[in-house]
Image (cartoon, rainbow, N blue to C red):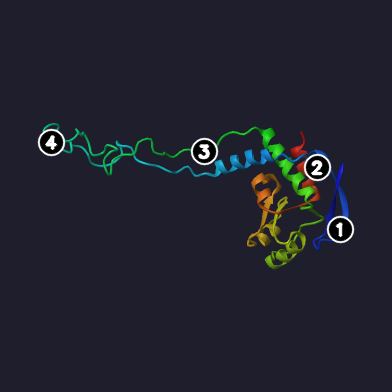
Amino acid sequence: MATLPIYNLDREEVGTITVSDEIFAAQVNHHLFYEVVKWQLAKRRAGTASTKGRNEVTGGGAKPYRQKGTGRARQGSRRAPNHVGGGTVHGPKPRSYAYKLNKKIKKGALRSALSLRASQQRLIVVQDLSFSEVKTKKAAAVFAKLTEGNALVLDGPNRSLELSVRNLPKVKYMPVEGINLFDILKHTHLVLTEPMVRRLEGALSK
């Protein structure tokens, strides 16, 4: 079983916590990172691109010119794709880019990400993250000590912490239920409390 140090808000070590090797000391699989981040970004796509076909553009009810006698190619409508202002052939239409991904892949990627941050000593377990009042200045000072100001913070319902960090450009608060690979990899440090470590162990165990 691996052990991680527990810190207070001044980055002073106040104890240790034993964690599961399966989740915090697993082999890092970078291919899973690629698969899961690609899946997350695909789900975020708006898919609102749209073009008009020849039956959707205006005009073109009559033939542009007579069928014979002009020496030009016959044309039936100015809405045809070969005319300026005509419809588009096989153009994009609104659609969803989301697709399904196996749960084992998503869990495996999260285990790899947690293990990567632990091996880099960038997984910071904090004794307590409760703030008595909403203070962005205080939060900035705390995370400057803990993580040099760049962190994803996972906790249970913690409104004072959430409001204190929401204006910090490189610190993001997230309920532990919303943990995802993209945000873990986007931030250089991961900060959480001991109860959140146990919840992750329960959720990500095989």
Between 130 and 107, the residue placed more toward the observer is 107
Q: Quadrant location of the N terminus?
A: top right
Q: Are marks 1 and 2 in contact (CB under 8 Å)?
A: no
* Type of amino acid at the residue the image marks with label 1: Glu
Q: Secondary structure at mark 4?
A: loop
Q: Earlier in the sequence, mark 4 or mark 3?
A: 4
* Type of amino acid at the residue the image marks with label 2: Ala
Residue farthest right in this picture: 15
Q: Pinpoint residue 40: horizontal percent, then vertical percent.
A: 60, 42
Neighbour class for label 2 at 10 Å: few (<14), some, many (≥20)? many
Residue 37 sits in quarter = top right
Q: Secondary structure at mark 2?
A: loop
Neighbour class for label 1 at 10 Å: few (<14), some, many (≥20)? some
Q: Earlier in the sequence, mark 1 or mark 2?
A: 1
Between 199 and 153, the residue placed more toward the observer is 153
Q: Secondary structure at mark 3?
A: loop
Residue 143 sits in quarter = bottom right
* Distance of label 4 from label 2 (alpha carbons): 79 Å
Q: Which residue is mark 2?
A: 25
Q: Are marks 3 and 1 in contact (CB under 8 Å)?
A: no
Q: Which residue is mark 4?
A: 70
Q: Viewer-nearest of labels 1 and 4? A: 4
How many marks the image carries: the answer is 4
User: Residue at coordinates 84% horizontally, 54% vertically from top-left?
Assistant: 6
* Type of amino acid at the residue the image marks with label 3: Tyr
Neighbour class for label 3 at 10 Å: few (<14), some, many (≥20)? few
Q: Which residue is mark 1?
A: 13
Q: Earlier in the sequence, mark 4 or mark 2?
A: 2
* Distance of label 4 from label 3 (alpha carbons): 48 Å
Q: Which residue is mark 3?
A: 97
